[in-house]
Image (cartoon, rainbow, N blue to C red):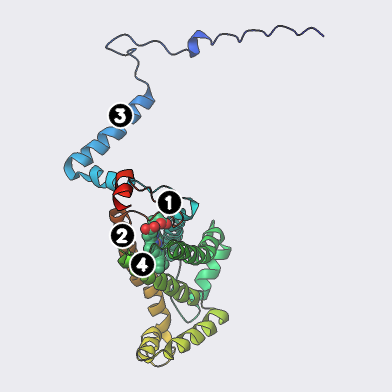
Amino acid sequence: MARRPKLPTPPVPSSLRPAPPRPGEGNGKVRPVDHAAEAGTAVVDWVDERTSLSGAGRWLMFRKVPKGTNWFYTLGSATLFAFLSQAVTGVFLAMYYKPDPSGGAYESIRHVTNEVFLGQFVRGMHKWGSSVMVILVFLHMGRTFFFGAYKYPRELNWVIGVVLLILTMVMSFTGYLLPFDQRAYWATIVGVNINGTGPLIGPYLSDFLRAGPEFGATTLSRFYAIHMLLVPGAIVALIGAHLYLVTKLGTTAPPWQKVQVDEELRKAQA
Ligand code: HEM
């Protein structure tokens, strides 16, 4: 069968064609999107002229990364994202939560879950997000361990990481009590007693967590303060230090990446 000739594509209607700019003055038409782009640039320029922050931004964002960098290197940023998601959802939960051990805490959580608009969704994000963050922080630690990223000169970043890991676990532990149902209550008593068996500081630690020798009325507010003020503040500061060191030292190349030895150096060493 003879092939039918292909029809030429119809021309773009003139109304949709961009008018060619006149030399030196554009086409005279300034679209709203141009205004918006210019306003954005003007604001950034205004701030930058007074703070010189763009240099720090470039230092942080535009870094050289070693050859062989792969998806495993995203686990740190994924952990950071999980933490930010916990912070945002936590703020909304705090707007409704009452750390009242005589029924108010349980009732406020029941209210968020059953009556508040999107309450169950936000609570679910916070609850499941906590497990996601714990899993990610362990995977990220595994990545840095197996890639040898804890070695010189990154030992301090590893140590900061260990503290971040402990603080992440403290967040999970203190958050678990907050719904103040039977499971939360008894699981926390077990957890605090386990802490009490630690060498030297164990008994002091469990007294600090309970806010006294017995699990009492102030225990819940102590856990709440640790969960939403003390530890998140420390985590934010330590993530800042962690990222500063990542930027300053750069990331490690994967251990299987072959080092390219300079030809002259190789000859000199032979
Ligand atoms: C809240 C927890 C944490 C956050 C948000 C976080 C974030 C990050 C980010 C964004 C990076 C750079 C990208 C990457 O290599 O993935 C990084 C690198 C690093 N992190 Fe973490 N991290 C956390 C916990 C930890 C833990 C628990 C450890 C180890 C005990 C650790 C040790 C390291 C090391 C050694 C590097 C340097 C990696 C390299 O040079 O290749 N971090 N972290």
Q: Are marks 4 and 1 in contact (CB under 8 Å)?
A: no
Q: Amino acid at mark 1?
A: Lys
Of the image marks 3 and 1, the number of the one nearer the N terminus? 3
Residue 216, quarter of the rendered image: bottom left
- Look at the numbered disc 4 and give the secondary structure of its residue: helix
- Look at the numbered disc 1 and give the secondary structure of its residue: loop
Residue at which label 3 appears = 38
Q: Are marks 2 and 4 in contact (CB under 8 Å)?
A: no
Q: Name the image quarter holding the N terminus.
A: top right
How would you rate the neighbour count of disc 1 (Cα within 10 Å): few for under 14, some for 14-19, many for 20 or more?
Answer: few
- Look at the numbered disc 3 and give the secondary structure of its residue: helix
Whole-angstrom CA distance, mark 1 to mark 2, is 32 Å
User: Mark 1 CB in 8 Å range of ligand 1?
Assistant: no
Whole-angstrom CA distance, mark 3 to mark 4, is 43 Å
Q: Amino acid at mark 2?
A: Gly
Nearest-to-viewer mark from 1 and 2 = 1
Residue at which label 1 appears = 258
Residue 167 point in image, percent of width and height: 39, 72
Q: Which mark is drawn over residue 72?
A: none
| 177 with respect to 63 (left or right) | right
User: Mark 4 CB in 8 Å range of ligand 1?
Assistant: yes
